[in-house]
């Protein structure tokens, strides 16, 4: 990078910082939909730069947080009653179920293994043919293609001891559900890298403003500054501030892969409830790899922990400190709700960074 380009970028970032700090005007509510944005904004100290007329609201973009209690109950049942080996990302292990977490189940003899990708899970299943394995497939448009790649590999390898417990979600229904709580969205860059801009354009047609944002400090500052500047014009807007990764069409290949194995379904979101066409589930043709069907799981009604306000936190209806359990009975070491467990959860972000502020 030449000195002049570097200086230009430095000036642009400084200008963005001034814009978000010096703003005075109508109260501006910006929802960072994505849990990674929530944590990065805290971690980079950006919250403390904001004018008091700007409010950041944490939204329902943490995959572990929006996964309902009943899903954890299903996983515990598979582990303890059906004798399956559960393969999962680490955060889900500590999320409380109605009665117990997977961690507690493990203490009772269940086989619960942490993997770092769905491909690792398929690899484990292939090399442990004596075990019935279930991968906990959660996440948004960004991670669902990886689950499909693992399934494709399992079919290609001819293994029958591998299945998915799906709670995959898609963002558009959540964007629509959260409209009343915010003036503009900070759209998740990694989701838009897959979907392209069509979902954001549909929101624009509904009158909802937003900016697609990356994850570095300069990218986040720029995105917030663009929201502040465009809001002054008084009409809905959509700006892609992450063009190095997000294109208009996104990734048709990733979407085609998902469409081969999965189809839209109604899905239960913690705090929001059942939303039509807000999830992805395996097609009937792949029922043999669907853990719910393979092990004939009954329908389970989960029970939230008493006093936990995760549902309201996820809808931007309260901030974590307004939960009476925050920092007292509920901490990252002893989480009561999913939003304190997850590395992308709003409660864990407020606990880790706000207290430090
Ligand atoms: S602080 Fe804990 S109990 Fe309260 S809403 Fe957050 S996760 Fe739930």
Image (cartoon, rainbow, N blue to C red):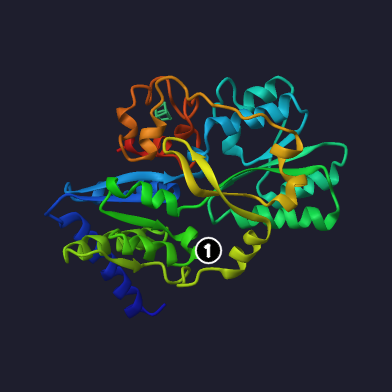
- 18 or 131: which is nearer to us? 131
- 224 or 240: which is nearer to us? 240
Number of callouts in the render?
1
- 7 or 315: which is nearer to us? 315
Q: Quadrant of the N terminus?
A: bottom left
Q: Residue at x 49, y 72 (%)?
A: 249
Residue 39 pos. (x, y %): 41, 46
303 to the left or right of 282: left
Q: Residues within 10 Å of mark 1 (few under 14, many from 20)?
A: many
**18, above or below 329, in the image:** below
SS of the residue at dot 1?
Answer: helix
339 to the left or right of 252: left
Residue 127 pos. (x, y %): 85, 45
Image quadrant in which you'd find residue 241 = bottom left
- 285 or 244: which is nearer to us? 285
Q: Which residue is mark 1?
A: 194
Residue 316 pos. (x, y %): 33, 40
Query: Which residue in the rendered view is the most extreme toward the left?
Result: 25
Q: Quadrant of the C terminus?
A: top left
Q: Residue at x 15, y 56 (%)?
A: 23
């Amino acid at each position: 990078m030449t000195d002049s380009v570097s200086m230009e970028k430095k000036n642009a970032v400084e200008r963005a910082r001034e814009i978000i700090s010096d703003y005075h005007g109508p109260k501006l509510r910006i929802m960072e939909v994505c849990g990674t944005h929530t944590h990065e904004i805290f971690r980079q100290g950006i919250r403390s730069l904001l004018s008091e007329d700007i409010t950041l609201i944490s939204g329902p973009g943490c995959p572990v947080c929006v996964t309902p209690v009943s899903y954890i109950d299903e996983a515990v049942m598979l582990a303890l009653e059906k004798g399956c080996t559960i393969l999962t990302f680490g955060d889900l292990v500590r999320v409380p179920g109605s009665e117990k977490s997977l961690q507690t189940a493990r203490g009772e003899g269940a086989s619960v293994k942490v993997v770092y990708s769905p491909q690792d899970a398929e690899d484990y299943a292939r090399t442990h043919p004596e075990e019935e394995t279930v991968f906990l497939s959660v996440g948004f448009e960004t991670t669902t293609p990886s689950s499909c790649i693992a399934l494709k590999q399992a079919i290609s390898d001819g293994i029958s001891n591998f299945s998915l417990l799906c709670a995959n979600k898609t963002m558009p229904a959540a964007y629509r559900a959260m409209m009343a709580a915010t003036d503009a969205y900070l759209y998740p860059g990694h989701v838009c890298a897959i979907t392209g801009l069509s979902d954001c354009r549909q929101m624009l047609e509904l009158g909802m403003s937003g900016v697609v944002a990356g994850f570095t400090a300069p990218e986040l500052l720029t995105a917030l500054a663009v929201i502040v500047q465009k809001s002054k014009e008084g009409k809905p807007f959509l700006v892609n501030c992450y063009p190095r990764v997000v294109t208009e069409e996104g990734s048709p290949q990733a979407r085609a892969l998902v469409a081969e194995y999965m189809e839209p379904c109604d899905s239960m979101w913690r705090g929001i409830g059942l939303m039509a066409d807000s999830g992805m589930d395996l097609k009937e043709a792949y029922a043999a790899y669907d853990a719910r069907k393979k092990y004939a799981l009954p329908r389970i009604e989960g029970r939230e922990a008493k006093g936990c306000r995760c549902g309201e936190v996820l809808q931007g209806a309260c901030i974590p400190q307004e939960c009476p359990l925050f920092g007292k009975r509920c901490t990252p070491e002893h989480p009561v709700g999913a939003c304190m467990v997850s590395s992308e959860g709003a409660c864990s972000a407020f606990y880790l960074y706000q207290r430090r502020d």
